[in-house]
Image: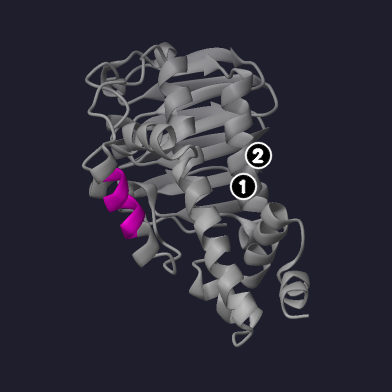
C-alpha cells in the first residue's frame, strides 16, 4: 500500500485488497476493496471517494459531530474537505479514492465553494456519468503507470475538481482576462524551451500567462485550437521526428530528450498520433 506522508494526510482504515495507487505532484489516486470496519482520516488535501459497490451499513461523522447512519448507494461521491476529520464505520465495498490540493479548487471558484462549512449531507452526491468517466480515466493512470501522461493526468484532475464543485452545488468561475497573442507567444516559447522536461505542468504554464490553471486551459484552447496537454504532445512528437530523421540518437534517448517518462510512453503516443511506430518512421525517412 502507498505510504502517504502523515504530515500531508493521516488515514487509518480497515485492511484493503487489490490496492493500487498513483501519485503525481499534489494528487493521489487509489483503487481498492475495503474490508468492513472503521476509517479515520484528516489532512491538508481534499479527499474524494466513490464507492463502486453499495454499502448496506454505513455511518459517518465530520469533526466532533454525531454519527449519521445512511444507505450509501453505488457510485456515491463523498467529499472530505482538507483540515476536517472524518470517521466512517461501514461494511466492505470497492472504492476509487482521490486526494487533491485545495489550490486546484480555489482556482475554479470565487468564494462560492466553502466545503469546510457545509453540512455532512451536502458533501455527498450520486455521481453523474461525466464525473464517473473522469474518475475512471484517472484510474487508468493507476493501471498504466508506464504509459500515463503527466499533463493529461493534471488536466483530468482539474476536470474532476470542476465536476465535483458542480455536483456539490457551486459553479466554476468563468471570469478572467483573455489570452492575448503576446501571452500566447510567451507560453509557446516557454514550452519550446522546456520541451524536454517531463514535469512541465499546466500550473507552470498558467503562471507564465498570469492566469489560474482552469482559466488558462480554456483560453489556451481558444487561442491555439487545442488543449495545452495536446499541444505539448504534438510539439514533442514534432521534435522527436527531427531526432528520428537525424538517426543519431536511440529511441530511449529521444523519449527522454522530448519529455516522455519512458520509451514505452513515447512509442505509444507516437503511434497514436502518427499511425506508425518510431522505428517504422525512422526507417521510412531514411530509405
Question: SS class of the residue under badge 2?
Answer: loop
Q: Is residue 185 magenta?
A: yes
Specify whether residue 238 is painted magenta. Answer: no
The answer, for residue 244, to whether it is visible in the render is yes
Residue drawn at point x = 52 percent, y = 67 percent: 239
Q: Quadrant of the C terminus?
A: bottom right
The boundaries of the magenta stretch are 183-190
**Coordinates of residue 246 in the picture (x, y in percent):** 60, 82
Q: How many marks?
A: 2
| Viewer-side residue, 180 vs 119 | 180
Majority SS type along the magenta span:
helix
Q: Residue at x 57, y 52 (%)?
A: 21
The earlier-in-sequence mark between 2 and 1 is: 1
Q: Identify the coloring.
A: one colour
Q: Which residue is mark 2?
A: 35
Image vertical order of residue 26 relative to residue 268, above or below: above
Numbered circle sitting on residue 15:
1
What's the CA distance linking mark 2 and mark 1? Answer: 6 Å
Return the x and y of residue 185 as percentages of the image width and height: 30, 50
Location of residue 143 in the rendering, given as x and y in whole percent from the top left corner: 67, 52
Amino acid at each position: 500500500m502507498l505510504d502517504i506522508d502523515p504530515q500531508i494526510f493521516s488515514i487509518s482504515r480497515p485492511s484493503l485488497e487489490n490496492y493500487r495507487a498513483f501519485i503525481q505532484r499534489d494528487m493521489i489516486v487509489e483503487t481498492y476493496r475495503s474490508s468492513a470496519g472503521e476509517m479515520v482520516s484528516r489532512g491538508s488535501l481534499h479527499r474524494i471517494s466513490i464507492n463502486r459497490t453499495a454499502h448496506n451499513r454505513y455511518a459517518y461523522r465530520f469533526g466532533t459531530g454525531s454519527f449519521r447512519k445512511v444507505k450509501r448507494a453505488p457510485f456515491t461521491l463523498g467529499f472530505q474537505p482538507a483540515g476536517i476529520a472524518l470517521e466512517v464505520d461501514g461494511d466492505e465495498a470497492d472504492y476509487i479514492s482521490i486526494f487533491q490540493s485545495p489550490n486546484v479548487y480555489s482556482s475554479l471558484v470565487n468564494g462560492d465553494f466553502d466545503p469546510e462549512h457545509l453540512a455532512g449531507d451536502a458533501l455527498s452526491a450520486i455521481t453523474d456519468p461525466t464525473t464517473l468517466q473522469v474518475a475512471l480515466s484517472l484510474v487508468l493512470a493507476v493501471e498504466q503507470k508506464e504509459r500515463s501522461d503527466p499533463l493529461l493526468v493534471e488536466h483530468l484532475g482539474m476536470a474532476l475538481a470542476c465536476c465535483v464543485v458542480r455536483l456539490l452545488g457551486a459553479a466554476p468561475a468563468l471570469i478572467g482576462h483573455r489570452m492575448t497573442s503576446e501571452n500566447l507567444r510567451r507560453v509557446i516559447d516557454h514550452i519550446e524551451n522546456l520541451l524536454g522536461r517531463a514535469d512541465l505542468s499546466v500550473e507552470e504554464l498558467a503562471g507564465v500567462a498570469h492566469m489560474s490553471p482552469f482559466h488558462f486551459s480554456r483560453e489556451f484552447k481558444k487561442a491555439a485550437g487545442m488543449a495545452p496537454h495536446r499541444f505539448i504532445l504534438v510539439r514533442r512528437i514534432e521534435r522527436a521526428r527531427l531526432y528520428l530523421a537525424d538517426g543519431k540518437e536511440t529511441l530511449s534517448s529521444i523519449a527522454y530528450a522530448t519529455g516522455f517518462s519512458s520509451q514505452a510512453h513515447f512509442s505509444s503516443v507516437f503511434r497514436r498520433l502518427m499511425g506508425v511506430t518510431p522505428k517504422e518512421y525512422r526507417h521510412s525517412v531514411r530509405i
